Amino acid sequence: SPADAAAPLILLDLNMKGLSGLDTLNALRRDGVTAQIIILTVSDSASDIYALIDAGADGSTR
């Protein structure tokens, strides 16, 4: 898709001002974006990480 051609890798912050990184991730995957998505987060919560992986994130980093 054009979105994938323009962005083969997306870095997404989990806690963006005014936006939810998890909601954004879900929307990207729902729209068919297949680019690798890496989430930037300061969270140590295992439940946060599992939610991101379940939503289609390819990984996370601190």
Image (cartoon, grey):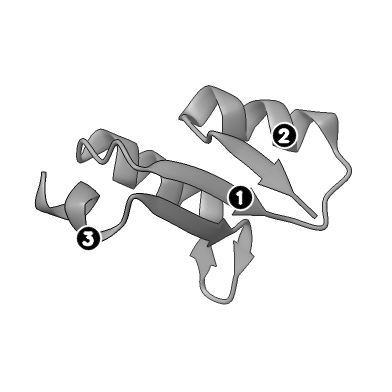
Residue at mark 3: 6
Per the image, label 2 sits on a secondary structure element best described as: helix
Per the image, label 3 sits on a secondary structure element best described as: helix
Residue at mark 2: 49
Residue 17 marker? none
Per the image, label 1 sits on a secondary structure element best described as: strand
Amino acid bearing label 3: Ala
Foreground label between 2 and 1: 1
Relative vertical location of residue 39 with respect to residue 13 in this rendering, above or below = above
Residue located 10% across and 52% down the image: 2
* Near-viewer residue (61 or 42): 61
| First in residue order: circle 3 vs circle 1 | 3
Q: Quadrant of the rendered structure where residue 54 is?
A: top right
Q: CA distance from mark 2 to mark 1?
A: 9 Å
Q: Quadrant of the rendered structure where residue 58 is?
A: top right
How packed mark 2 is, by other alpha carbons closer than 10 Å (few <14, some 14-19, many 20 or more), is some
| First in residue order: circle 2 vs circle 1 | 1
Q: Position of residue 4 (x, y in %)?
A: 22, 48
Foreground label between 3 and 2: 3
Q: CA distance from mark 3 to mark 1?
A: 18 Å
Residue at mark 1: 39
Amino acid bearing label 2: Ile
Figure quadrant of the N terminus: top left
| First in residue order: circle 3 vs circle 2 | 3
Amino acid bearing label 1: Ile
Figure quadrant of the C terminus: bottom right
Residue at the bottom extreme of this rendering:
17
* Near-viewer residue (43 or 19): 43
